[in-house]
Image (cartoon, rainbow, N blue to C red):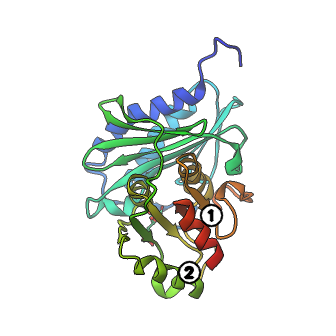
Amino acid sequence: MTVADPDPVDDVVATIARSAAEIRQGLVGRRGKADEENPSGETQAEADVWADELLANRLSSIDGVGEYASEERSEIIDTGDERVYVAVDPLDGSSNLKSNNTMGTVFGIYDEPLPAPGSALVASGWVLYGPITTMAYARDGSVTKYELTSGERTVVEEDVTLPDDPLVYGFGGRVPHWHDDFREYVREIESNPDHKLRYGGAMIGDVNQVLTYGGIFAYPALKDDLRGKLRLQFEGNPIAYLIEAAGGRSSDGSQSILEVEPTDLHDRVPLHVGNTELIDRLEDAL
Ligand code: F6P
């Protein structure tokens, strides 16, 4: 890259920020199911397919973007360029469309072809479609929060860190499918009178609660699936990168999510993120 070259990372983030209002608006009339499953075997919503197409077209045409990969498509779009490689969950939590609850767009920007370990991330973030549209973005060990309005990004907080005193917890998966040691750990978290349950069915909404109030979010290994539910490239790594940049920790149960070596683009990973002391205790408990 020469000094004069535009930074593809900035272009990717600006494009996602500019597209957010359109994605939000485009949810209207697209709340039904598509006749397709995604590569993880989940029924896609019309909005999943539509948001993926929109982001695929825009992000893969940015100069310097070598690959576009998404949770909603089995194959990577390979542009032949080779500076950054983008992995996206276009609409995280799209099962919330029906009940009109929170959803998001999650992205990871890697400097290695996909699938890549989280240690190859150079930036990551998410858009949250809540009562207002916000973005959390991590790069170079620092996290910034923005409000997004019609394509404009307004900084609301720089150098964001997790609050010291954890307040919220949210754990995915059916309780009967949790392993006993994880269940014990949850009991301990619940028994602290300072802790409050927050679980909304969209990872990104729940993780944003952890970023805002401190605490822990997990979608753990389950008795019927040791890999849990969430996808490493599209969800686990980007979330872990941002939470670690905010001074927290991530874990697959024994190591940072960012250290997990991928074997396949659509790999799943048990995900635990939050305040360092809570993740340390979790690793001791498992
Ligand atoms: O991407 C998967 C996802 O929609 C996450 O956003 C969310 O945390 C999880 O699935 C919800 O799963 P469940 O319906 O099992 O609670």
Horizontal side, residue 136 vs residue 286: left or right: left
* Most foreground residue, 1 or 192: 192
- Residue 132, horizontal then vertical, whole percent: 27, 44
* Residue found at x 49% / y 33%: 13
Amino acid found under the numbered disc labelled 2: Phe
Figure check: 264 above or below 135:
below
Q: Element under label 1?
A: strand
Residue labelled with disc 2? 182
* Residue found at x 46% / y 72%: 172
- Residue 112, horizontal then vertical, whole percent: 73, 40
Q: Are marks 2 and 1 in contact (CB under 8 Å)?
A: no
* Most foreground residue, 65 or 172: 172
* Most foreground residue, 138 or 189: 189
Figure check: 211 above or below 175:
above
* Residue found at x 46% / y 76%: 189
- Crowd band around label 2 with a 10 angstrom C-alpha radius: few (<14), some (14–19), many (20+): some
Q: Element under label 2?
A: helix
Q: Earlier in the sequence, mark 2 or mark 1?
A: 2
- Residue 278, horizontal then vertical, whole percent: 54, 67
* Residue found at x 61% / y 35%: 140
Horizontal side, residue 123 vs residue 126: left or right: right
Horizontal side, residue 89 vs residue 45: left or right: right
Label 1 residue near ligand 1, CB within 8 Å: no
Residue 251 found in image quarter: bottom right
Residue labelled with disc 1? 251
